[in-house]
Amino acid sequence: MVLIGKQKAAMLLMSLDVVTAAELLKGVSPEVVEELAMELASLEASGLCNSREQEKVVQEFCNSLKKSPSQGLNIGRFLNEMLASILGEEKAEQIRTQIKKSTAHKDMFISIRSAGVDELVVALESEHPQTIAVVLSELDPKKSQEVLSLLNEEDRLKTVWKMTTPDLLGFGVKQRIASMVSERLKSLKGEVFVAKPGKREENLRKLAIVLSGLEKDLRDQLLGEIIKHDEETGKTVRNLMITWEDILSIANRSLQEALRTAESSKLAVALYGADEEIAQKIRSNISERARDMLDEEIKLMQEPLEKEILDAREEIVKPLREANEEGKLRMVGR
């Protein structure tokens, strides 16, 4: 979306501190101030008012003025302080009320976007996957991914499918969905979703399995969105698509190709204390000569540290992940 003049002016004001912004607007009529405030609220509702867009606008007006990427935006507080400083508290309150009504009318999902992840998880519990898909599509990608990862497995699978094959829903249907979820959020009264210890990685693992089952192009697109907004989470999801435990689900030919370059010393460490089924599958997919070398390494090996075992298993899994990213990994079920 191309920003218009008023939007750029509103965003430029956000790059200034409240006192400076108020000083600049002292000679401006209340009507213009109100318009700028409305534009700020509208930009926030549309998701355009972020550090990246703001920096573009600032650079366009003055290349020497750059906002620190680490400095977050607090539009609500900025508006409140700026309006009160220029117009007085009474007039500022009138404008705030008008802004709230206007933005709510323009954007049905504004209250949903401002809700926390845990609140959204509770609000969407037991909802139809189509409803969940509509709500998630209106959130920023990072929040959408976080909510999706916390849903139960059945809802997650069905929702991802709905998101990848969107139905053409009319304005009225979306309005009813927005209204219903908004009312649900209001009724929660502080009720939140509490994740159990270790739950996040478990949910990310489930999300990774869902994504790995999609067509490569679509999977890469969805994973790219996660990485764009949260690189560390994206990296975790990518790695969790294929883990050491998945060796049992990998077709023999794919496993043979991956193990062909594995060092006997690393494989010996990786198999220390490993599940017997995994150990047997690996041994049955290497050559007789490689098995002899592996047995020799095991005889000479000292008891490895836990970190050494985990690192060795990561190294064995690495070519399997690479094959998966290239769309060449064959699976026989999970």
Image (tube, rainbow, N blue to C red):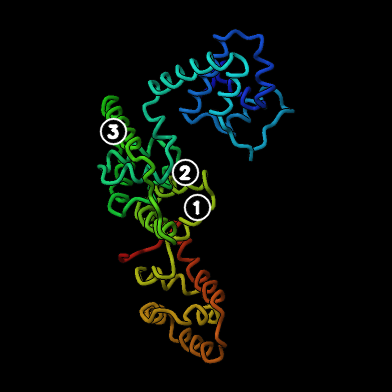
Q: Which mark is residue 77?
A: none
Q: CA distance from mark 1 to mark 3?
A: 31 Å
In the rendered view, tell whether residue 212 sits above or below residue 260: above
Horizontally, is 234 left or right of 88 in the view?
A: left
The residue identified by callout 2 is 142
N-terminal-most mark, 1 or 3:
3
Looking at the rendered structure, the kind of residue marked 3 is: Met
Mark identifier at residue 233: 1
Of the image marks 2 and 3, the number of the one nearer the N terminus: 2
Horizontally, residue 192 falls left or right of residue 8, namely: left
Asked whether disc 1 touches disc 2, contact meaning CB atoms under 8 Å apart, the reply is: yes
Task: Specify few, some or many for label 1: CA neighbours under 10 Å numbering under 14, 14-19, or 20 or more.
Answer: some
Q: Residues within 10 Å of mark 2 (few under 14, many from 20)?
A: some
Q: Residue at the spot x=34%, y=50% of the render?
A: 151
For this view, does 40 lie left or right of residue 23?
Answer: left
**Sequence order check: which comes first, mark 1 or mark 2?**
2
Position of residue 293 relative to residue 1, above or below, is below
Which is in the foreground here, disc 2 or disc 3? 3
* Quadrant position of residue 266: bottom right
**In the rendering, at what x and y percent does residue 130 appear?**
27, 40
Q: Is residue 134 visible?
A: no
Image location of residue 79, percent across then percent down: 56, 23
Question: Judging from the image, what secondary structure is the residue with disc 2 in?
Answer: helix
Disc 3, SS: helix
Q: Position of residue 317 (x, y in %)?
A: 47, 68
Q: Label 3 belongs to which residue?
A: 180
Q: SS for tag 1?
A: helix
Label 2 to label 3, Cα distance in Å? 23 Å
Question: Residue at (55%, 86%) from the top-left corner?
Answer: 303
Q: Quadrant of residue 167?
A: top left
